[in-house]
Structure formats: structure tokens, C-alpha cells
Image (spheres, coloured by chain):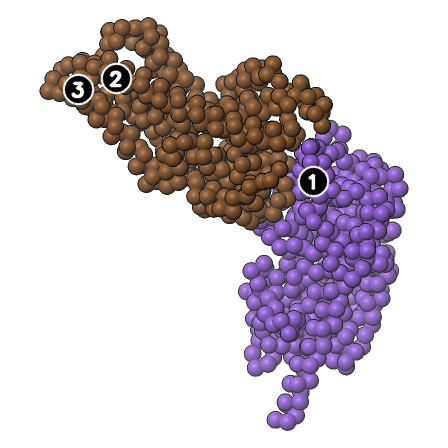
Chain colours: A purple, B brown
Amino acid sequence: MNTKISSDFKPDAVVVGGGIAGLQSALDMADQDLKVLVVERNASIGGHMIALSKVFPTLDCASCITTPKMSAAAHHENIQILTNTEVQAIESGDGVHRVKLLQKPTYVNFDKCIGCRLCEYACDTEFRDRFEEGLGAVRAIAVPFTNAIPQKAVLDAEHCLTCGTCARVCPTDAIEFDQKPRRLTIETQAVIVASGFELNSVTLKPQYNAARSQNVIAPMTLERLLAPHGPYGRVLRPSDGKIPGSVAFVQCAGSRDESIGVSYCSRVCCMYAIKQAMLLSGALPLADITIYYMDIRAFGKGYEQFFQNAKAMGINFVRGKVARIDPLQGGDLRLHVETTEDAENPMQERVHDLVVLAQGMIPGWNPAQISPVACATDGFVATPSLTAPTATTAPGIFTAGTAAGPKDIVDTIAEAGAAAMQACQYLYQKREAALVG
Amino acid sequence: MARTVNTQLLGKIKRHGSGGRLDVSACFNCGNCVAVCPLAEDAAGFPRRMIRMAQVGMEKELLASEDLWLCYACGECTQTCPRQADPASFMAAARSYAIAQYDFTGLSGLANRSAWGNLMVFALFSGIFSLLLAAKHRAGAPDAPLFGFLPGEWIHSIGVALFVLVGLSAALGLLSMYLHVRAEQVRKGHVLRFSALPGALLSAISDALMHTRFQNCNAVEEMQASSAEPWYKRTWAAHAAVMGGFLAMLIATTLDYLLKPIGSPVMPWYPMRLLGALGGLVCLYGLAIVLSRRWRAEEVPWRRSSFADWFFPLLLAGTVLTGLVTEIAVYAPMGEVGHAVFFAHVVLAMDLVAMLPLTKFAHVLYRTMALTLAGWRRAPATEAAADAHA
């Protein structure tokens, strides 16, 4: 546990969330010589982006962009990072925000842990690795993933058998089975909410039968299958390890659908489906890849070209909303869809080996009840001002990235910079006012 | 060929059934409803295609689509519609609109658009039949047998006249539907062989009787709360009970009329009597399921009920109940109460027949016609002919 940070620490700004938005905001503010505290609820910073294989439309390696940012933030003299820590409340008054934090026990003293992983190698207990979307296994005490920051072991109390093996092999006596949750309140002048997104469940629509077939997968699962350092190192379908010969992407499976409560567009699914289809055609040159879509929303810089390239590569685009997915004997899946290609036979039933459901983006954190920040009707942080798009309803609290609504990485990073700029401006105006006063 | 667009079409359809409460304009034509439908076959494309026709005002095409009648309102499309545009209720409203359009009297439009209109038409027919019957009733003799109170010959004379008029009206409605469908077939260049017609008609009737397609609509029920319910509580079974019971009563009444001297006393186990009584009970069982589901309004297809949705099953239930009480009154005379119930039964039964081409009841005509036409169009000989034409 990082004990260096106590309630005496008074940073200029607190950033809620250590994903790509939070890290970019923190770095931009820290470079302006402001002291920043980044609060991350997971064991490592990096957010969703560090788990991606590649990013659209450049097909750059996601790790190669995220890891340097993570590292830069971790080593910046003006940035402090608290992982395994949740924001429980933000109380604002007199221009000061009191951020109430709950630091959860990791059962490893971070001041002592040197990240040697001897505990991980010695541990006997394994369970499904959430970072690998359940495809691989992880030990009950482990560094969260290869390029995690901080590179410190974290013990999973839910699965640990408390056999004591890790404590015996640890060369620095860092294991502390008696750690307790720690509460601390940080006073700060400005807050940036960069709490990101979650994806809604693939089992939301019972017609898609994701609960009945392992081969109906989430897009993050495919990201891990495609990642060079992923669980299998290649693309295999989960049920039987077969190399898929035919892969379907079902778009709008979790968004633009009022029957599951998400009426808005998640804005990234078209593009990541195209990207994953391109990567798949590289990984599985013989596979047929079909994207079932209602309309392709390729609105960003270079996106339309990216879409056209995918078509030229031979990826099939079929207009139609998939209504039902039936699991077949042997693990294949039959899709029911009304297409517009063949006017005489619009009703089609097509069989695929593997189906990827484009899930919807939903807010990762709801600050509405516990802070002065209001949320819009869709649940994302409300940004009422057209001319200050990162300002929330609370003065001195800003927002960036997918906390404010679904958006892609490019827009997230641009918005994170804007939020940092607005926060700096706010802080400097306050300082000036204090000097004049 | 030029197409005429009726810009008022969607608004007109929304005035039917529970249409006023549905937001079918929200539909963005994704086709989920078609793909999820357990009944949509090959080129059917319903309900999406029908919604599109309504949105862009293709009235002729809408009135020419047999597909409108191939839907049994299981509600799966509404359950899964991404825009919650309620396609199932739209289909019901469009069918109601079609019934009104095929009907030349204009009474159907009045009855299907509002509760007041429905009650006015009901009151009109009830008034006519009551006056006609009252003209020859014999009051003041509470102990008289039922046919002593209302002369059987008079009831039958009115009945025969009514059947002729309703038959004519139904035939004109069916002709209107056929002409719409035919015009569209000519436009599309479909060539149909008459040799395929009897087969199509037979399979339509057998499908209607056996509920073959209706049973495919189980998907939604299985997914919803009623999955735990046994088959005899499913929608198709309830419909089969109502229809079977009704047919039994219809056959019993007709045979009674043809084979038995009017008013001659028979024992309760006389086959026609028995058939009628059993039919009435089975029909009531089905109606009880239907009405209780509508009342609970828990599952999708029963959630939005218009007055017309309530009216038809209630009218039928009223007819059957008064009929059963009359049946008892035959063997255990009830005096004036018996007479009143008998009078009400005759009036309600005549209302039921008179309103057949006007209410939901008209689906008996148009669904059978649509199934026949669809079967005819899809007959193998037809496709070959169409290919030759192309």
C-alpha cells in the first residue's frame, strides 16, 4: 500500500481515473508545474486502452502509445498516483474540493515490493484472468499484467487461500495479510472527472444467446485474442479452440436499442469492428469476415478511407440488424437478419463460427449522488456549456473522455488536453484573484 | 407506372386500434422485427415493409399486402424493437384500417376508430334487432315456453335475411381485398395458375383450423413469464378454443335449423344440443384466457388494448353466456327472467353476425383470404411462370 500520500498532501488538482484521458490531463497539468493526484480504482493505470491490440484508423499498437504515457505519468515529479482507490465523495465549498478516498488493501506493502514476481511464481492458486477477459489464468497474488504500472504485486483476497507461500518467498517482507482499507480526504482546488466507460453485458438481449454460447463474444475478448501478448497468442474460438473460418460482427448489439435501455450511439463500434476485421484478415487469411450493420458511422479524420480500405480488403459489409442468434450443435451460430442486398430474398439465415457483439458504452462511474457533478439523462457527466465543453455543472470540476459520453481515443485525448487547459486557467485565475485580494 | 401516395395514411392508421398510443414514426427501418419474426418467410418482410408503406403513404400497396394478415401478434417484434416503435400494435392497427377500407358501408371505420363509434354501431344494430323481435313477441305469459315468447319462425326469418346481407357485405369486402391484391400482382407481373388455387385454399383452411403457423408464435411466450404455463394456456390454444367452440356452436345452430322442427322439445343429450353446449363451454374457456391476459396486460401483445380489442371477445362472451342460460331455461323454466335472457341472446347473436365484416371478427374472412392468396402466389407453378414472364 502506498502510504506516502496522506491527508496532508494538498495537490492543485485531483484526476479521477487513470485511463488515457486521466493520464493525458494529469501530464498536461503537471507540465504546467501544477501538482496532480491521479486516483485509479484498478490495480494498474492505463484503463481500457492498455488492453487493446491496435487502434484505428492508424493501426498503431495500443500498448506502444499507452505504456509511455503511463510511464511518463508514473515518473513525473508533479504527479502522484493512487491505485486500488475509489472516490467515495467530493464535497465542494468555498472554492475547495474535499475528495474522500477509500484505498483498498492490496495486502502488499508497495513501499517494500520491488516487483520481482517471486510471490506470483510461487502461488498455487489460479483463477480466470479478468484482464484477459477470462480467457487466461492469473495467480491469486500477481502483478496485474505484463506492462502494468505500478509494477507491484496485488493479492486477490477473494481467491487467496492464505497459505502463506508468498510471504515466505518474498525477499523484502512486503506481504501484509493484516492490511485494512484506508480512508483519506484530499483537499484540492480543481478536479477532473475522467472516470471512463464500461461496456454493457453481452447477455442483455436474450435473442443473442450469449449466455448459451461461448462463441458469442465481447469485442474486448477479441481485442485480447488479437493482441500479440494475448492469452493464446493467436485467434481461436473459445468453445473448442477451433480456428474460426467465418467470423461475424453484429453491430448495434448494445447501443441504439431502446429495448435494452441504450438509445444513443456508442460512436466507436463501427470503427473498432472494421479495425478488428482488418486485423482478423491478417491473423486468419482464409477466414470470411462479415460485418452486419445498420449504418456505418465513419465520421472521424481518415475513418471513411479506413472503411473503404476494409471493403477493398474483401471484408463483407451487410446492411441489416441481426435479430436472433441461434447456437447450433458443434458450436457454430446461425444469424437471422433482414438484408437489403437481395430484394427478392431479404430474409437470411447465415451460419458463422464466431460472433462478436458490439456492446454499448455506458458510464463507468456515477458521480451524481456523491458530488456536485450532475449527470445527463443518458447517465454520462453533463457538460452544459457549448463553449466550455469540458466544464461540468460544478465550478472547478471538469470532465474529459468517455466519462462525458461515448467517444473514441482521438477525441478523448483531445478533450483531456482541453480539460487540463481549462483546469489550469481556472487555477491561475484563482491564484491571481488571491494575490490581488 | 405512377404510384399514388397518400400523405395522410400514417395518421389515419394511428386513429385505429391502440394506434394513437404508438410511435411508429420512430421506426428507422433496421429490419429487426422481420428477422426476429418466427413467421416471416422468404420475401415477406413484415412488419418492417408494412411500416415503411405506412410511413411513405403507399396505401394501395399496404391494402394489397397479404402479409398484413399472416401476423398473429405474438409481440416478439415489439419486445425487441430497438426504437420501441411497437410494430405488433402497428400491425393490429393496420389490419383494423384495412378492414375499414375493404368495408363499403363505412360502419367499420366508425366502429374501429373509437369506443363511442363502436358503441354507436352496436346500439344501432341492437336497436334494429330489438325492434324487429319486439314486433312479434308475446308478453304477459311468463309460463310460456321460450319459442312461445318469441316465435321461432320469426327469429329464423330475420336470421336468414341477416345471413344473406352479411354474406353479401363479406363477399364485397373480400372482393375489394382481392382487387387490391390483384392490381399489385399485375403491376409486379406475377402470373398465377388457377390449378394452384384449390390447393392453396385447402392449406389455408387447414392452417386456420390446425393453428399450425400460430403455434410457431410461441417464442415470445416461452421467453416471457408465461413460459412456465402449459400448452393449454398459450395464446394459440386459447384462440383454438374460441374458434373451435364458435364453430361447434355455429354447426349446432345450423344443423338445428336444417334438421329439427322449430321449437320441438329434445333431451339435453340430443347430439346438436350437446355439441352446442360443449362448444359454448370451450369457447368461454378460451375467452376467459384471452380476457384475463388483456386485463393483466403483462405480456407484450396484451399490453396495449383498444376498445375494439375488448369489444369483440366481450360480445362473443355475452352471446355464449346468454346462450348457456337460455339452454338451462329450456329445461328449467325461469319465467320472465328466462324470456329476457333469451331475448338478449338472440339480439347479441344477431349483433355478432351483423358486425362480422366490421370488427376484429372480420379477420376470419381476410386472414383466410390472405393465407389462400399467399399460398397461391408461392405455389411452385407460379414461380416458374413468373420467371418465364421476367
Find numbered disc 1 in the image and state the secondary structure of the residue it sits on: loop
Same subunit, tags 2 and 3: yes
Find numbered disc 3 in the image and state the secondary structure of the residue it sits on: loop
A379 is higher (above) or lower (below) than B319: below
Left or right side of A82 for B359: left
Chain letter of disc 2? B
Image coords of residue B219 (percent x, y): 57, 31
User: Alpha-carbon distance for marks 1 and 2?
Assistant: 57 Å
Inspect the image, locate mark 3, and give the three-letter code of the amino acid beneath it. His
Image coords of residue A388 (percent x, y): 64, 74
B150 is higher (above) or lower (below) than B238: above
User: Alpha-carbon distance for marks 2 and 3?
Assistant: 10 Å
Quadrant housing the C terminus of chain B = top right
Same subunit, tags 3 and 1: no
Image coords of residue A69 (percent x, y): 82, 67
Chain letter of disc 1? A
Quadrant housing the N terminus of chain B = top right
Residue name at image x 73 percent, y 58 percent:
A299
Inspect the image, locate mark 2, and give the three-letter code of the amino acid beneath it. Ile
Image coords of residue B368 (percent x, y): 50, 23
Q: Hey, which residue is sitting farthest front in the picture?
A: B1
Find numbered disc 2 in the image and state the secondary structure of the residue it sits on: helix
Inspect the image, locate mark 1, and give the three-letter code of the amino acid beneath it. Thr
The residue under label 1 is A340
The residue under label 2 is B155
Disc number for residue B137: 3
